[in-house]
Image: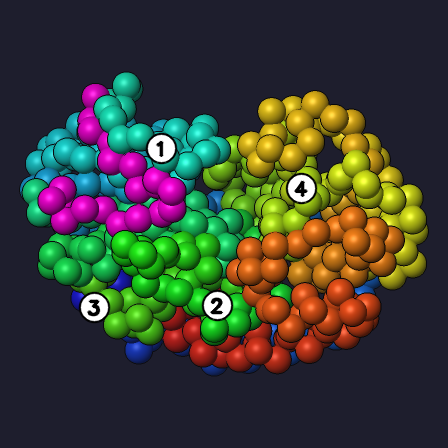
Amino acid sequence: MSYYYQLASVNVKGRKSVSFVTTNHDQLTGHPSMMRTKRLLAALLPICGGCVVISKQIDPVSELAEAKVRPGITILLSDSMQLIRGKRIGLLTNQTGINEKGVSDIDLLREKKARDASVNLVQLFSPEHGLRGTEDRENIASGIDAKSGLPVFSLYGQQTMAPPDSILRGLDALVFDLQDIGTRTWTYVGAMVYSMRASARLHKPFIVLDRPNPLTGYIIEGPVLDSLLANPNDPAPGRPGQAYALWPMPLRHGMTMGELALYYNDVLKIHADLHVVPAVGWRRDVWFDLTGLPWVKPSPNMPDIHSAVLYPGLVAFEATNLSVGRGTPEAFQRVGAPWLNAAATVAMLRDREIPGVRFYNESFTPVNASDGKYSGQTIPGIKIVVINRSALQAARVGAALLWAINKTAGTRLTIENRGFDLRFGSPSVREALLRGDDPDVLIDREYKSAYAFREATRSYLIYR
């Protein structure tokens, strides 16, 4: 097993210095002073949860860290070609698998540089939403990619599944490149775990081309998924998988795909021949829109960074009779329903002065909503505006929303309890919120277990 890690990437007044080497797993802990800083930042999270940064600008970014990042695909082709040289490879990717110039992995792995290294891309695999990321439904068919002419095997039927052994046997290695969204509810992580397991079973190298965590790698928050709900196993007849609820980890985990691959390969004892090719230039404090990388919607309802920031706190409402804004240009930045008393709910939320966001009473009209909720109806809604992403805790927003809506709606709010819990993570937190317990107190209690997860995963972290 070999890992490829970035040790340093510094930008000072436009001058860039990058050090990129191969290292062993026991070198991952980083410089002691950096580790002390990270521990301090993590320890301050519960305190900073009550801090509000006042600014006349909505979500100011001028003082946030920036970095010029090159994703794993670029590093593979420039520094790590030995991983795929002379091999018949499969590629699990979609529209997010691009380099810093927006060129698709599929094209890059068929261009002259790859051909000169006798790389033979022979098979594509696609996750939920399909190869081009336009599908928002189940049962996505396999077929032929019209642009490249390559066969595409869909890993998304009624649920996410593993690549079949019959196809993997004909490959020398499987390459993985998908953009995570920074929360444990993202099915692309499940596709990675299932694919790692299939590759290990057939003794095929599994190569992860890493990308930044869009929500940074510092902030961890939210309920840890109840261990009684977690299921990391492959789907099997009569035993559905849970690609979006694999393992007890916080709602916002602060890890990249490559780091998650290292972690899952170990804790799940997959024993894959795993190679992680990191993104060069990324640091844990850098948000995606400050990396220089193009934002490509990782799913049809993830239009921008603000939806991504709020998504961890709002995704659980998909298991209720509230719309989360699917069928609008601002999905996961609003909730609504015909029965919602938006004005009264917004008043309660404003009284709480939740850091990082503002709430507005604003109706909206879903159009061809993929969740089937209220399409064509103008419904009362609550618009959530991110005013300071660094102060925002999505789980706190989600908890406050459930608490307030339940108080104003009563029996008109319906919840599919298991679906909500699989996403938000904690049946006990849901039950307490519906009893009327203070949402801030409940979320503050979750930091101990979230911080324990960060401590347990520290040795798997690639970036400083």
* Mark before the other along the chain sequence, 1 or 4: 1
Disc 4 is placed on an element classified as loop
In magenta stretch: residue 279: no
* Mark before the other along the chain sequence, 4 or 3: 3
Which residue is tagged 1?
Answer: 140
* Mark before the other along the chain sequence, 3 or 1: 1
Residue at position x 39%, y 29% in the image? 132
Q: Are marks 1 and 2 in contact (CB under 8 Å)?
A: no
Which residue is tagged 4?
Answer: 324
Disc 1 is placed on an element classified as loop
Which residue is tagged 3?
Answer: 271
Residue 83: give x, y in percent of width and height: 16, 50
In this picture the colour scheme is rainbow
**For the residue marked with disc 4, what is the amino acid?**
Val
Which residue is tagged 2?
Answer: 229
**For the residue marked with disc 2, what is the amino acid?**
Leu
Q: CA distance from mark 3 to mark 1?
A: 30 Å
* Mark before the other along the chain sequence, 1 or 2: 1
Q: Is residue 7 visible?
A: no
**For the residue marked with disc 1, what is the amino acid?**
Ile
Residue furthest top as drawn: 146
The range drawn in magenta is 149-168
Identify which residue, 158 or 12, lies in the foreground: 158
